[in-house]
Amino acid sequence: MPIYKAPLRDQQFVIHELLHAVEGLRAMPRYKELEADTVNQVIEEAGRFCEEVLLPINLSGDEEGCTLDPATHAVRTPAGFAAAFDAFRAAGWQGLATDEEFGGQALPQLLQIAFDEMRCATNQAWTMYSGLTLGAYECIAHNGSAEQKALYLPKLTTAEWTGTMCLTEPHCGTDLGLLRTKAVPQADGSYRITGSKIFISAGEHDMAGNIVHLVLARLPDAPSGTRGISLFIVPKFLPVGTDAAATAGKRNGVYCGGIEHKMGIHGNSTCQMVFEDAVGYLLGEPNKGLNAMFVMMNSARLGVGVQGLGLNEAAYQNAVAYARDRIQGRSLSGVKAPDKPADPIIVHPDVRRMLLTARAYAEGGRAFAYWIALMADQQLHHPDEEQRAFGGDMMALMTPIVKAFLTDNGFFRASECLQVFGGHGYIREWGMEQILRDSRINMIYEGTNTIQSLDLLGRKVLMDSGARLRKFGGLVQQFIAENGTHADMSEFITPLADLGDKVQKLTMEVGMKAMGNQDEAGAAAVDYLRVVGHLVFAYFWARMAQVALARIAADGAKVDPFYPAKLATARFYFQRLLPETAFHIRAARSGARNLTEFDAAWF
Ligand SMILES: Cc1cc2nc3c(=O)[nH]c(=O)nc-3n(C[C@H](O)[C@H](O)[C@H](O)COP(=O)(O)OP(=O)(O)OC[C@H]3O[C@@H](n4cnc5c(N)ncnc54)[C@H](O)[C@@H]3O)c2cc1C
């Protein structure tokens, strides 16, 4: 049975010692009363929920999966999923960070992200039902009319009703401009929606009284391509009432036509959804649906990145426990466990390499993701306009990096942690193969990681001539200026500064080439994202090293071993993981020709 313990110590380090989050959040009127104790208590309680409620139904949920009754179109989720959702709902967890006006607790995004990390670590499939509900909440909160907000937001806040996002169609995945689902206006102001969607997560299930589908469709006179897409609210049951007291009324013309049998996240229903003259309500403006949906997509992209982080941590914890316990061979530098017939495999350098790699990516990812959660709040709630703009710029720049860098790391670390188990990792009961399978989808949905890299390089960097990237560079420069003269920090500062210069040069070079041929951007993008992801990680690892060094200097021999461990992980990151950038810079600089001169017919 896989294990998991909420990483409370590291979470508290990141929140209080690295980011000084409570101080920063209290500068925003929405959080002026926030206390550090509240933050700690919420995270501890959330961790307990994940350990005690979600983890026990993760392996069984994977084995049982979801089942569809073709006669009724009803989908049954695995045993324990609905009961866990009831407990989650009763505790008010869904409304953790949503607005008080609609019944939420209005706590910072930071707490939501910390909870998301832990619940994805313990049960990603289950978490998605609630994650999509949160995305639907945000989308309606951002785009909805006063009436739509009054009706739907309280229901989504309590998770009495859940949400979905319906974009994908059989012939239309990445390229949403191809979508065909139709919306026909009715005399009463509603629309009739007809079409087929595929791969709809949480499209049908037995965990809530109603499902609120957010559906992209075309109006009859809509222009072709992405400019002719509108967004609609299509409830499974038509609501009766106008506010929190509304009930689920008549069945609407939307049903699940089939569920996918897939590689992982078996406990989440991935549905083919059929819309037959279903009643829908326009959300936002006609033909501006894709922009409106981007609110949900951006929130989901951050959520998916955090799924990668959670599984990275889960894989790490299980691999460490196994490596301490499993005895095979003797240490090359002499026997370490003379009382045993062999040493635990944790003595072997390469096993340590795999464990430290997973640890460094998990802890670096946590620092990065929690900082981004602060930027999300800063963007919306900071009283100072400049600070809000900075938060917005960081959100825009970093969203593709959170999504792609953390999910690539999640999958590849899951694979290495499985390797720590040898053949036992490949066997179901240890849970490692489930973590590996579950983590694979994170690189695909919400825009594949290739699409994220194109978004980063094209839209987020080149289109604004690197302005947002320079703003992040400003943070890096400031840190270097403040710490560059400390001898203890030079092993971190020197490579950080060096990578900062290289990113600048690489951006210029790729940008120049792309002006002549857009394929140059396409050919460089994935390597580019990996390099910039490392710049972000190097920045946070250097900052973590600095905090650790200060504590070691202050506490001397009495220092909590947490700090020397943090420092050693920082060294490992800089010496063993960061050098990956040399390869990616070289690959990115090699240009498009080695990809395009190969004739398509030669494949
Ligand atoms: C389990 C699961 C759950 C999902 N949940 C949802 C959901 O809830 N709602 C929803 O709407 N969708 C959902 N999806 C769909 C998912 O978002 C799409 O699968 C994804 O966006 C990719 O689309 P596609 O599968 O059609 O691949 P395609 O778009 O056909 O892409 C195939 C390959 O080509 C590459 N490619 C495509 N276009 C370009 C380009 N312009 N430049 C470079 N490379 C390109 C892609 O990166 C990919 O490698 C889900 C999918 C799965 C498997």
Image: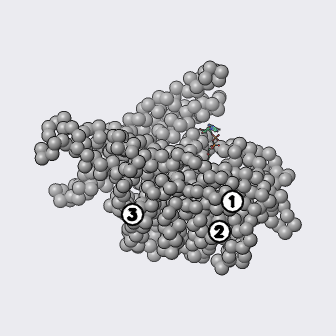
What residue do we see at 23% from left, 40% from top? Answer: 328
Q: Is residue 254 left or right of residue 436?
A: right
Residue that label 1 marks: 71
Task: Residue 86: give its label.
Answer: none
Q: Residue at x 80, y 65 (%)?
A: 190
- Nearest-to-viewer mark from 3 and 1: 1
Q: Which mark is residue 51?
A: 3
Image quarter where the C terminus lies is: top right
Q: Nearer the viewer, residue 166 or 205?
A: 205
Q: How is the protein colored in the picture?
A: one colour
Q: Residue furthest front?
A: 71
User: Disc 1 marks which amino acid?
Assistant: Ala
Residue 390 location (% of width, % of height): 54, 56
Instruction: Report helix, strand or loop for mark 2.
Output: strand
Mark 3 to mark 1 CA distance (whole Å): 37 Å
Outermost residue to the left: 338
Upstream in sequence: badge 3 or badge 1: 3
Query: Can you say which quadrant of the picture contains the N terminus?
Result: bottom left
Q: Which residue is label 2 attached to?
A: 210
Q: Residue at x 69, y 54 (%)?
A: 257
Instruction: Find numbered disc 3 in the image and state the secondary structure of the residue it sits on.
Output: helix
